[in-house]
Image (cartoon, rainbow, N blue to C red):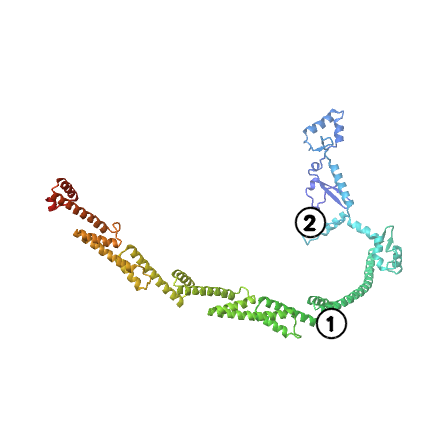
Amino acid sequence: VRTPASKLKVPNERSCFGVVHYAGPVYYDVTNFLEKNKDQIVEDVKSMIKKSTNTFIAKLMAEGEEGGAEEPKSKVRSRGGGGAKKKSKTLGGQFKASLNSLMETLNATEPSFVRTVKPNSKKVGGLLEADMVLSQLRYSGLLEVCRIRKLGYPVRRDNIEFYKRYRVIEPSATDLASLLEKVGASGKLAAGTFALGKTKVFLKNKSAQELDSLREEAFVVQAIKVQKVARRYVCRVKMASWKVTLAAVSAAMTSRSEAELSAAMDLMNELPSGGRHLQVYKDANVLLQRLIEEKKLLAMLESAIASRSKAPITSAIQAAKAMVPPFEHELLGKAESVLDRIAKEEAVTEGLRKACKDRDLAAIDTLLGQAEELDMGETEEVKQAEALKKRLEEENTALEGLAGAIEARDMTTLAAFIKMCSEMGLSNPEVAKGKALLEELQAKVAAKNALSEAVATRNLEGITSALAKAKAIGVEDLGDAEALIETIKKEQAAVAALVAACDARTLDALEKAITDAAALGLTEASTPEVATAENLKNSLVAESACLGALNKATAANDSDSLGKALAEAQQLGLTGPEVDA
């Protein structure tokens, strides 16, 4: 043990010691050395001290347990379910367990040790301290290993591995012994540069390098042989493949399938020069271009037919006919029929437009029939034509009904058809004629109604005025209006005679007037003057009878009869000389 040299950078030089190893001294710091290496007392030693007959020693162990820190306790399950204290491990036991675990891991694997060397003590890049590196190599024992390896055979290979690795140098060797014999006889491996062991072959570095060089040269020779066989096989496979490709091209040309021919042409790229020098390639290329053009033309025809447009269909048909030889396909005939149909549809469409403009019902009906035959469907022109046809038919129906109503002079039917024509917006002479006739009929009906109202009220002036208006507008059926005027005039004259007779209080005149009024149908209920005349007549008859009775009683000087006659005269309100006398 010695203190560290001053040139070594060791902290706390005064509190460390060194141990001299074979590679050099190793220094240890004693600061807290005991604390770091403190270990527990083995349980057997504890038990022995406690059982000591020396009371002082036994007391030391008891005091140490009381004053010492409480050891960590852990519980483990026993088979009976109870707990037991786990014994704490000592540092030696822990080190031993760790070392055993490390050895088990190393034995289970194939470790590769990497020795690291610190280039300098400053821990910076690009700086190498030779003394420090040399001391690390010396301490790790590498220099000693290198020296020992140089004295012997550093390259060592298993017998089987050596035979498999270098057999290529002498392919005729059947085992390891014959291989080493032939290699040595040929001078490729000098005597004394190798040694054969029980399980391994030992080699010098130079000999191992020479064998590896010979192995690489032998690999080249063997690779050329393998390449020769492989290239022959590849050429034969290619030739067979080329024949299959040419057969596929021929079959595709026969079937005229673009996909198959294109795939076969792609395979021909594997042939020398892509097969372009072969006549079959040239013919196939021409046919492929033709098939591509036909495919494009078919797509053009299908698109044109689907669009039902005249220009694309015409262009596609012209392109098909321009091909050499001309293109023949059922789709071409379909395109021509579609083109002819489109021409017919355009003619029908144009005719419908003109017929709709001219409002020609017959032409519209004919053209709609043609459109139905062509199955034109619900085109705009067909819809407009159908709507116009329906409108024209309704207008014709309305005009025919209006003409019939005018002829029949039926005001209700005439009004209905005029309203229908007005709703349709018709304004032709027939409608104007119907409106004029309707106004005339309405005026006549109004005049007849006014006349009827006047007749019902028996108003002479109203009847006369209404009758004049009815005659002015040509009402033919005037009924009994004129006769009623004469009757009313006679009734008025009879009423005037009744009034005059009542005023004159003449019995004969009253009777005549009452008789004339009764002859005209005047009654007391309908005519007040008749009731007045009847009452006055009765009064005059009673007065005349009373005066006769009074004169007779006076002449007969009959006081009873006279009294009765005076009482009756007084009751009748009679005055005069006869009553006074």
Q: Nearer the viewer, residue 535 or 20?
A: 535
Of badges 1 and 2, the one in the foreground is: 1
Q: Residue 152 in the image: x percent, y percent?
A: 84, 52
Q: Quadrant of the C terminus?
A: top left
Hey, which quadrant is residue 292 in on the image?
bottom right
Residue 121, label in figure: 2
Badge 1: how crowded within 10 Å, few (<14), some, or many (20+)?
some
Q: Is residue 20 visible?
A: no
Q: Residue 211 in the image: x percent, y percent?
A: 83, 58
Q: Is residue 513 visible?
A: yes
Up the image or down, 377 lies above or below 567; here it is below
Q: Nearer the viewer, residue 520 or 137?
A: 520
Residue carrying label 1: 280
Q: Nearer the viewer, residue 97 or 224?
A: 224
Q: Amino acid at mark 2?
A: Ser
Up the image or down, 273 lies above or below 486; here it is below
Badge 2: how crowded within 10 Å, few (<14), some, or many (20+)?
few
Q: Amino acid at mark 1?
A: Val
Q: Residue at x 54, y 70 (%)?
A: 346
Q: Residue 257 in the image: x percent, y percent?
A: 69, 67
> Circle 2 — which element?
loop
